[in-house]
Image (cartoon, rainbow, N blue to C red):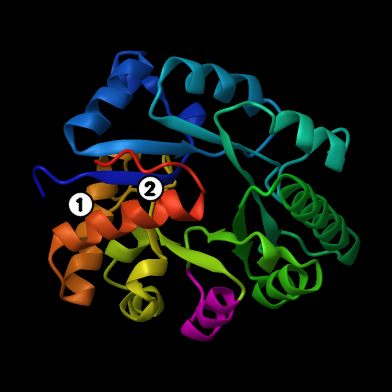
């Protein structure tokens, strides 16, 4: 995988434990660069992330950011559309999210309704400023797709990140103008459903990510993930789809710049 160029389309630099990197974010980015990672999207999950992300984007030219509140994040005040718009005004912000629905640990209907209202606010903000959405969905696929359709999110599109649903859900998401992104889960031997979808997603709608510091790929499973390891996701997709790694690297990079409406640097 040497001499290939990758984009990590979804990571959380602000959450990486820097002890592993001599307490220096420079070392995280250097390691990523040494493994061919040319661009990163560091994704927001709570309001406290925002000033940290602004600082990261201002220090590192190849780091883009998003703004948004994860469906499971607890906040004192729900973000309004106007607040999301204000946060997104930073020039390095290229997306709204991550947002969506997560019913895995959300059992009450009241809490689920609150998630749906938060998701709708993110969709409306994204539509107002024409920035794509980064969607998180867990055990809530039907409601997620319903809201995407009902709130006209297909008009702006975006990415279904860390995809783990079946092909039927992927097909419907593709029809709603969303890309499908695979994380280190695609390297797991027991991830048969993810493998099936990874073989079927059109090559021009495919993205790769680490979701670091979570979900480290094989052979680093159980350890802290970081952007340099996105090459292992690309390698797994190359093997599953029986195409050369160069094709995966080139196409997923092109897809990233197209999905997020930013100039391709010609890497």
Quadrant in which residue 197 is drawn = bottom left
Is residue 202 found left or right of 74 in the rendered image?
left
Nearer-the-camera pick, 92 or 41: 92
Q: Secondary structure at mark 2?
A: loop
Whole-percent x, y for residue 63 in the image: 43, 30
Q: In percent of the image, x 33 and y 65: which residue is there?
A: 186
The crowding category of the residue bearing disc 1, from other C-alpha atoms within 10 Å (few below 14, some 14 to 19, many at least 20), is few
**Residue under the point 36% across and 81% down:** 200
Query: Where's residue 265, x and y in %?
Result: 32, 38
Per the image, the residue denoted by label 1 is 219
Numbered disc 1: secondary structure? loop
Q: Please say if the residues under marks 1 and 2 sit with CB atoms less than 8 Å apart.
A: no
Note whether residue 75 is visible.
Answer: no
Membership of 19 in magenta stretch: no
3D distance between C-alphas at marks 1 and 2: 14 Å
* Vertical comparison of 44 with 259: above or below: above
Decide which of tag 1 and tag 2 comes sooner along the chain: 2
Residue at 28%, 19% in the rendered image: 27
* Highlighted range, magenta: 164-175
Residue 183 picture location, percent across and down: 38, 56
Q: Considering depth in this image, is 165 or 172 the residue closer to the camera?
A: 172
Residue depicted at x 17% and y 70%:
239
Towards the viewer: 223 or 92: 92
Relative horizontal placement of residue 193, taking residue 160 as reference (left or right): left
Question: As displayed, is residue 155 above or below residue 80?
Answer: below
**What percent of the width, then of the height, locates residue 34?**
17, 31
Magenta span dominant secondary structure: helix
Instruction: Name the residue carrying label 2.
Output: 210
């Amino acid at each position: 995988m040497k001499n290939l160029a990758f984009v990590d389309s979804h990571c959380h630099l602000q959450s990486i434990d820097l002890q592993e990197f001599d307490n220096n974010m420079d070392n995280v980015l250097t390691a990523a660069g040494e493994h061919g990672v040319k661009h990163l999207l560091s994704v927001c999950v709570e309001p406290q992330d925002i000033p940290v992300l602004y600082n990261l984007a201002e220090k590192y030219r190849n780091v883009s950011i998003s703004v948004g509140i994860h469906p499971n994040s607890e906040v004192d005040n729900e973000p309004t559309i106007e607040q999301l718009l204000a946060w997104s005004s930073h020039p390095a912000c290229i997306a709204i999210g991550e947002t969506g629905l997560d019913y895995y640990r959300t059992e009450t209907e009241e809490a689920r309704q609150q998630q749906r209202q938060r998701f709708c606010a993110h969709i409306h903000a994204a539509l107002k400023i024409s920035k794509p959405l980064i969607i998180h969905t867990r055990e809530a696929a039907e409601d997620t797709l319903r809201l995407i359709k009902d709130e006209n999110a297909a008009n702006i599109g975006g990415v279904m990140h860390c995809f783990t649903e079946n092909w039927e859900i992927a097909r419907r998401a593709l029809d709603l103008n969303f890309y499908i992104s695979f994380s280190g889960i695609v390297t797991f031997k027991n991830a048969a459903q993810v493998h099936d979808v990874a073989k079927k997603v059109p090559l021009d709608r495919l993205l790769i990510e680490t979701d670091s510091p979570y979900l480290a790929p094989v052979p680093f499973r159980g350890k802290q993930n970081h952007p340099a390891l996105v090459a292992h996701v690309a390698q797994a997709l190359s093997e599953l789809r029986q195409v050369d790694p160069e094709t995966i690297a080139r196409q997923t990079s092109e897809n990233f710049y197209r999905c997020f409406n930013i100039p391709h640097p010609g890497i």
